[in-house]
Image: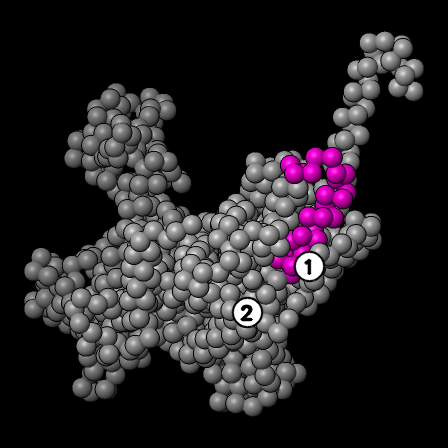
Amino acid sequence: MKNSRIMVTIYVVAILAGILFALPNLFSASVLERFPAFMPTSKVALGLDLRGGSHLVLEVDAADLQKERMRNLAEDARRTLRESGIAATSFQAERQHLTITLRDPSQRSKAIDALETLVNSIGNGRTDLKIAARKDSVLELTLTEEGVYAATSSAVEQSLEIIRQRVDQVGVAEPSIQRVGVDRILVQLPGLQDPSQLRALLGSTARMSFHMLEEPEAAGVQLLKDEKGNVYPVQSRVELAGDRLSDARVRFDPKTNEPIINFRFDSAGGRLFAEITRANVGKPFAIVLDGKVLSAPVIREPITGGMGQISGNFTVQEAGTLSALLRAGALPAKLTTIEERNVGADLGSDVIEKGIYAGIAAFALVFLFMFALYGTWGLVANLALALNVVLTLAALSVIGATLTLPGIAGIVLGIGLAVDANVLINERIREETQKGRSALAAIDTGFKKAYATIMDSNVTALIATALMFWFGSGPVRGFAVTMAIGLVISMFTAVSIVKVIMIAITRGWRLKMINIRPLFGFKLIKDGTHINFMKARFIGLAISLVLSAASVALFFNPGLNYGIDFRGGIQMEVQTSAPADLSDLRARLDKLGLGEVALQEFGDGNRLLVRVERQPGGEEAQTMAVESLKDALKAADAGAEIERSEVVGPKVSGELATAGILSVALASIAMLIYIWIRFEWPFAVGAIVTLILDLTKTVGFFALTGLDFNLTAIAALLTLVGYSVNDKVVVYDRMRENLRLRKTMPLRDIINLSINETLARSLYTSATALLAMLPLAIWGGPAVESFAVPMVFGIVIAASSSVFIAAPILLFLGDWRTRRAASRRISSLTKESPIDRVLID
């Protein structure tokens, strides 16, 4: 029991390094510029919900990509056969198949050899195309699954670069553009952005082409419209593709002062454009962008300078967006916005302020509680708690993590859970002191006995956070990261650091006995309690079953208030200049014909939540609905501000719902396996049955209160899974210990004894977690309401279920196993001898 100088030195260096890396978060960027070169300057990046901005998830339109691939394949096959002197009567493209009918069946082998040049290798002996002969004159070219996957992946990679160029063109600072999965791209743009402009900027393929006009009845003509609905007979043949553009800029017409777009071709494009215009003087031609006619001027004279002009009654913003699209180039495939979230900068600053206040209040409450419980020794735990927060911020800064509001919630909850180990250690040391052990012996034994329990409780919590990170997205992942970092660091601060300090104090003051006592005699639980909890086991189980049954009924009626994450649609958070007249506003919005419109006040009377179901149609339908809602809200209140808007598609909402359910189920199974391995199957079954009852009550709480059931709610359920099992593990650990020490004591008495011995610890840790969550539930605001409020409820439920549900179930299973074992012994004896049967009777 001596502190190693080497270990103490390592601890001190680690703490000083942590303080150094956390320090930049206290200063502005201008101050950090004046820091010495050797000091770190990286800060924790703030998420969009804290600083405002736009979050979009774009998905490659696989059907459009495949359609384009088949169109190109048909053209390439036609050209290849023509160059090889092979005649074909038809080319039919359908999904992943191109069927070619040859005029002369005897040329089949020659045609296959020619078409083989179109097959590309994609590695490991795989190709993107297969060629097969169906009949003597019929060949079929089929896109392989590997080829489709490779094409999609290539399109995403190409789209990433083009999106970066487009974002750079409009001058957005610090954008985050990254690939997500096989066919998706995540775009995060800080600062308040116009959603409609972003959707136009990022979702448009921007394929521009130049076509001649022809008579409507002519062959190879398609009818295209412009923005006003005018119809143009456009030749399908592309005279000049937009990829020959080298520049496009917004200018103003000197005569009308309207914005126009001047474009310039590269050298090859300029020569081709000159030839086209020279050969078609007096004829109209169309400039087409993504299947729409931008303009259709008449060629008055040959254009030989390699430059042109597009006019189309554009607004300045539309012209700027279009010129940015043309400069960046065309996307290889259409991108669909399947998820969109926008947060105003003002709302972000309010959220930061609330999060900081909630964090300070949580720390103060836990600090005072620990000081009141353990007096001077409580200050040691509080020091470890402060170090935990500092080192967590340092770790987030070093790894470059993004801090979101749920991330702040993770830090705040970590404040409550970090002292769990300290409570357990202090209670163990106090027990050893009561047994008459000396100060150093009590510290040594207390830490050894507490360590296994601390490990078990933290591992269960880490399992939940790992699944949260795996299945979650965005802010939920941010919560999981901060929670996991806090838990790991708490093992260092609450165990290693506290042990070093306690040994140093004991040796420095030469303490014979270590007296951990509450301040002013404050005690929630008296020492040596002998409450017969198992006497009330039937009452506890009955109440729990009734509450869970009622919760299941509430789940079906009235049901959960599913948030936009799970049901898709459009949601807006609106700040009005005065308390809104909901009936008048609802009447205005109903006239828009957008389907069911839900209005909800929250916070104060000046804040509204507007929800509208997802509109039938594509992205344009969602854009029109968003703009219609904005216009109606502005008409009702000219001073209204849209602080947050979200658009979630049905595909995303379905995936999130599946991932949420799966993560909770897998977390429960993981807990079952872990407890089964660490203890025995009756312990595991007892914990899981209790966990199911706890979760059903929490779901019932959501249904009863009408809280949004969204991704944050799933994070709350997963956290409660870990917390609930954490609480049971501590009681189980003491039961296992007593089963080894008191082999002749009846199981019921061992369970009662174990609950009484751990009662103070269970109540104290539940109280610290509760005190940490209360400020967040009160001041955290609507963004974390679905996490903090149910967590407060869940902590109370988990603490009571450990005593009144998990323990009785364990008793029933233990008694059942004992009776079954006795029955087996009796059966084996009765088979051997009739005399034994008489003796047994």
Residue 391: horizontal and vertical position, in percent? 37, 62
Residue 143: horizontal and vertical position, in percent? 34, 36
**Total number of numbered labels?**
2
Q: Secondary structure at mark 1?
A: loop
Residue 311: horizontal and vertical position, in percent? 25, 75
* Amino acid marked by disc 1: Asp
Specify the quadrant of the image occupied by residue 393.
bottom left
Q: Looking at the image, do the residues carrying marks 2 and 1 touch, with CB atoms under 8 Å apart?
A: no
Seen in the picture, residue 439 relative to 39 is either above or below; the reply is: above
738 left or right of 193? right
422 left or right of 552? left
User: Could you tell which of marks 2 and 1 lies nearer the N-terminus?
Assistant: 2
* Amino acid marked by disc 2: Gly
On residue 742, the disc is: none
> Is 742 part of what is drawn in magenta?
yes
Name the residue that disc number 2 marks: 375
